[in-house]
Image (tube, coloured by chain):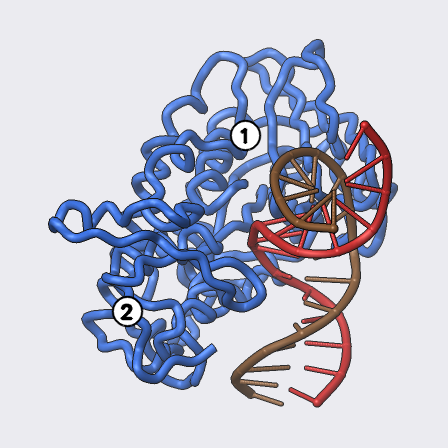
Chain colours: A blue, B brown, C red
Amino acid sequence: MPELPEVEVVRRGLAHHCIGSRIADVRVLDARSLRRFAPGVSEFIRQLEGLMIVDCARRGKYMWLVLADEMGNLLDDALVIHLGMSGQVLLKDAAMPVEKHLKIVMELYREDQKPLQLRFVDQRIFGGMFLDQLVPTLGEGGEPVPAASSSKLSLSLIPRSVAHIARDPLDSLFDIKLLRKKLLKTSSGIKRLLLDQSVISGVGNIYADEALWRAKLHYAKPARSLSLTQTKELVNAAQDVMHTALDAGGTSFDALYVNVNGESGYFDRSLNAYGQAGKPCSRCLDNGKSSLIVREPFMNRSSYRCPVCQKTPKFSHR
DNA sequence: CTAGTCGCCTGTTCGC
DNA sequence: TGCGAACAGGCGACTA
């Protein structure tokens, strides 16, 4: 499933191949992929057709295309894309066979390359697209700051529906002090906070477990009991895991007929905790100890940890 | 206000 | 073998 590094790979692919393109012939094959766009299918098509793509930005797992009209005037609305659980954005020649779960297609025209089809494919329909108004991104003093480090134009604008989301660990403006402030004013376990988009964005169940394993922290350790050092180590761990995945997935997007997709070879190899129930903890093995990764329910989903290096805290909290 | 649950989805895997 | 249940999980909407 697409996690933040995969979304970033998609964003880079889109930035590389779509900026400067004109959108034409938008087709929506499944209206459920526009669930979050109240005006509906025909309005979506009417508003998009003929526009130019001028930038592609991302925060957490949300990305958005900044648009301009034929006169080059920036639009108030951006095209927001979320991949959800199973979404893919593919760039393909129109002659390529149609994918089974194809939901939205748009033709992209740019002078220096063959026409491309942007195809949104989504099996489980947790993802989708919508148009949303861009609003200023303000710093603590109310001054405009870049919305996301991934924006080429460093636009100080962010879609209204994405504005409540915290910066992600790969954002150059990620604020560890702000994170700690949020951790201190809750009674929840640390993993619940890791998965809360308004606290830190882009961390899903997989990366939460991997970051906690690297930082040797139990998922139920009260967030407010983490020292500043532990908080830093946890964020560093999340960044390390994400950079590793980005390196693994970010290599192939520049091929001729690009597959900007949500797959990563990373998940097959480099996981230390997630999905590893019953397998030895590699760190314990390196230290001459022996322990097996366990799977436990937390927040109605699975959590994986090493019982030796991620000990249950005296006071734990959901 | 916060904490926590629910529903949206479909393909795969599991137990009976 | 067939079939329903459980599971996977991001996140907005909702309830307590």
Q: Amino acid at mark 2?
A: Lys
Chain under numbered label 2 = A
The quadrant holding residue A282 is top left
The answer, for residue A85, to whether it is visible in the render is yes
Nearer the observer, A271 or A80: A271
Q: Residue at x 50, y 69 (%)?
A: A198
Is disc 2 placed on a helix, strand or loop?
A: loop
**Gap in Å between the C-alphas at discs 2 and 1?**
37 Å
- Residue A255 vertical placement versus A267 (above, below): above
Nearer the observer, A199 or A290: A290
Chain under numbered label 1 = A
Crowd class of label 1 (few under 14; some 14 to 19; many from 20; radius 10 Å): many
Residue at the extreme left: A288
Q: Give the percent coordinates (x, y) of residue C3.
A: 86, 42
The quadrant holding residue A119 is top right
2 or 1: tag closer to the N-terminus: 1
Residue for badge 1: A261
Nearer the observer, A18 or C12: C12
